[in-house]
Image (spheres, helix red, strand yellow):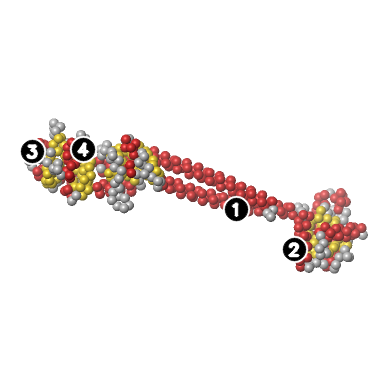
Amino acid sequence: MTPPRRADRSKLIWLVCLLLCSGFLATTLISYFSSRDTIRSTIIDTELPLTSDNVYSEIQRDLVRPVVISSMMSRDTFLRDWVINGEQNIPQMTRYLKEVMSHYGAFTAFFVSDDTNIYYHADGVLKWVSANEPRDAWYYRVRQMKEPYEINVDPDLANRDKLTIFINYRVLDYNGKYIGATGVGLTVDAVVAIIQDYQKRYGRTIYFVNSAGDIVLAGRSKEGGEQRRNIHDIPGLRDQADAILASKGGSFEYDSGAGSHFVNVRYIPELKWRLFVIKDDKLAASNVQYALYFNLAVCACVTLLVLALLYISFNRYNKALEEMAATDSLTGLANRHALKLLLDQAMRDAGRHASPLTAILIDIDHFKALNDNQGHLAGDRVLRNLGQMLKSSLRTSDIACRWGGEEFLVVLKNTDLTSALPIAETLRQRVADMPAADAESVRISMGVVAWQVGETIEALLERADVQLYRAKQEGRDRVCSDAASPS
């Protein structure tokens, strides 16, 4: 059974452990959630809008520029005059379109005449458009629309049907009459590469969405090809899709099931698309999570260190208390409580090994008179000197204790009565030779008895006390033994 003192110590250590862990955990988690909320707020309010602004600035250069070029072409006086004058010099138009391509770095440039239905290209006449040709449906759509232009993705007949983003601009004469469509084109691959460059540099997912919610342009998926779908099909985002498309932009958040995502949406009037800039919450919180794990590890180490130091301190303190509880503070010998434990163990060992054991009970003669005449300090010096003499005179296996007041008890292991008597006489003589206290020498009386198998501590000490009393009666300063004890 665990001693109550040890059980209390264990409870205290566990309580300290619980308090430390609770404190560290609470502090770490509060710091973690606070940091995460700050990061989320920073991402939503600052980081994503700033990224969106940067991407938009680059879009002005990379994607909006073709819209501006097409707008300039639609209002170019040369182009309108050439059409109004009957499209007489075809090489002039081809040179014009070729100059647009080379000067502005467009992938393709075109003009379709509403009067002749001729599709002009930088390489010359490409074809005649027809209302019955499905591939020419875009032209008749542009012809009927009210907006000045549209952005459309179609195969480019002049470039082996390479998928191309066309900016189709309506061309009006000086009276506002529709006379054709013009514009430039960029390959989808080139635009996808631009978007992927954005994503790589900004560490975000970026794509463009039209008014119907279709993702018209995005970086390539891991499987290859463009990520072309509708935001109504994206889990978590579909619930906010209509609200996003009805707005001009803003910050949003959705959960796709695989994690939370932050979204900043910006409407680009030149393209009539919405720019989506998305950041994964896992990536955003990864550094904070690493910090959380690191802090928890540090807290665990600190807790273990504190517990180790506490355990060591408790052990040292407990050992000091045990020494104090078992040691007489004045003489440094074992006290009466410790003697009983030590003597009980010595008796068991002697009984088990059939070895002799002898007890010597010592009393300082006339100690009360010494205290009365010379003071208690002198008496304390005598007690200390006697204790030091006993420790220096006995074997390490022997037991010496202060039994109480001016009485001392010595237990000699593996020593019979015959051998113990000379030892007792030697101790008596050494006391007599000790430095005198204020010119009065110290004398002791001693009772020596041998332990009998099966005898209790009380019985042994009672016999020793009888022999001590006898020594006192016979004149003190002498050794008396129990003649009935076996030798």
Please report whichever mark, 4 or 3, sits nearer to the chain's N-terminal start. Answer: 3
Mark 1 belongs to which amino acid?
Ala
Q: Distance between the residues labelled 3 and 1?
A: 98 Å
Q: Residue furthest front?
A: 132
Q: Distance between the residues labelled 1 and 2?
A: 33 Å
Please report whichever mark, 1 or 2, sits nearer to the chain's N-terminal start. Answer: 1
Say whether residue 81 is left or right of residue 203: left
Q: Which mark is residue 149?
A: 4
- Say which residue appears at 47% left-offset and 42% top-offset: 33
Is 29 in front, or is 315? Answer: 29
Q: Which mark is residue 86?
A: 3
Report helix, strand or loop for mark 4. Answer: strand
Residue at the disc numbered 1: 308
- Say which residue appears at 31% left-offset and 50% top-offset: 221
Q: Which mark is residue 396?
A: 2
Report helix, strand or loop for mark 1. Answer: helix
Mark 2 belongs to which amino acid?
Thr
Is 413 in front, or is 446? Answer: 413
Mark 4 belongs to which amino acid?
Tyr
Mark 3 belongs to which amino acid?
Gly
Is 432 in front, or is 78? Answer: 78
Q: Does residue 47 appear anywhere in the picture? A: no
- Crowding around mark 4 (Cα neighbors within 10 Å: few <14, some 14 to 19, many 20+) is many
Q: Position of residue 324 (x, y in %)?
A: 73, 52
